[in-house]
Amino acid sequence: MQLLLASNVIAKRVFSTLYIYIDIAFLVLFCIALICKKKYLTLLWALFGGVLYMVVDYGIFHVLMHSRFIEGGNLFWVLLWMSMSYGITNFALLWLWIGKDKHAIEFTLAIFIWWLVAPMIASSFGANMGQITIWRETSGYHGYMAIILAVTFGAAIVYNLIQKDRSKRFPILRLLLIGIAVQFAWEFFLLIGGIRSDGFSFEQKITTIIVNSLLETNLGGVMIFCLFVLITKFFNENLTKRKDKISFTERIKEINETPSCFKLERHEKSSNNNSSPTDV
């Protein structure tokens, strides 16, 4: 129990430089796919996620807290790629699943399959290329992350207790599950691909994946949902303005009543309606 609750979790990655090049190619194709499906809001949000990750990872973790370390590469450029890679994919997944997008499953599978095969491709064909080792120590900031998670979810819980209309409450459990699933998938594929925590013991690897999955993405779950509600009550996915004017709580109700992506196709056929409030 003491091990799993340890605050000093070291998140370490070891990979070939080929991994960077092929991943950049995937990111370009992924963004093009979003454009082709007119998911412009998702694309803008994903790009924002990449920039935000860079600000946090380089600006806060490295410059302010001195918790980032690297061997075999330039810290700025490697962190820029890592931030854009996982910022784009993670934020896209969060946006698609929060909005119950009808193509959430397809885009999710594309990302998950890539996270699975990319390390294999890089290790098989990039063995003679340079190897990069990068890690961060988390003892200095996991406590702050825990405070943010407690405050934001605590505020959502209080709001739900006050809100009498059940349809206008925050989908707290759903947000929690989405946050855990996105971070866990990221950590899991890094682990089985041989990238995450190379050279660490099995217990250390499990500690990293559990702590990060429960904490890191989840701390922004409520805030991301609020931003999703605020933005999509004015704009459709293709950036056209919504004609109807609705309140913040009415938009929450609209999202809650939208069928999940697993049921959306059947719902559309029964209602003869090929669009949903979050997917135009």
Image (cartoon, helix red, strand yellow):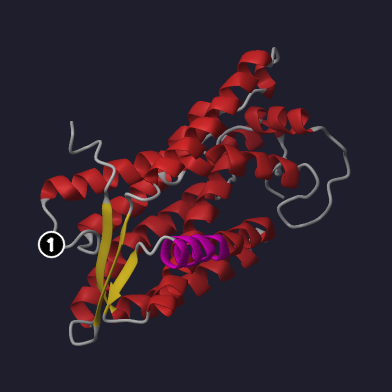
Badge 1 density bin: few <14, some 14–19, many ≥20, Cα 10 Å: few
Relative height, residue 68 to residue 181 (above, below): below
Residue drawn at 67 percent across, 20 percent down: 167
| Residue 99 in sight in this render | no
| Residue 85 in sight in this render | yes
Which residue in the rendered view is the most extreme toward the bottom?
128
**Dominant secondary structure, magenta:** helix
Q: Report the span colored magenta.
A: 51-64
Q: For residue 20, which quarter of the picture?
A: bottom left
Residue drawn at 47 percent across, 36 percent down: 147
Q: Would residue 237 be counted in the magenta stretch?
A: no
Relative height, residue 73 to residue 280 (above, below): below
Residue 172: percent from the left, percent from the top? 53, 28
The residue carrying mark 1 is 199
Q: Is residue 10 left or right of residue 261?
A: left
Name the one closer to the observer, 222 or 124.
222
Q: Secondary structure at mark 1?
A: loop
Q: For residue 102, which quarter of the picture?
A: top right
Q: Quadrant of the N terminus?
A: top left
Name the one closer to the observer, 236 or 149.
149
Residue 107: percent from the left, percent from the top? 49, 55
Residue 119: percent from the left, percent from the top? 26, 68
> What residue type is disc 1 on?
Gly
Q: For residue 133, which quarter of the picture?
A: bottom left
Residue 256: percent from the left, percent from the top? 64, 29
Relative height, residue 233 to residue 200 (above, below): above
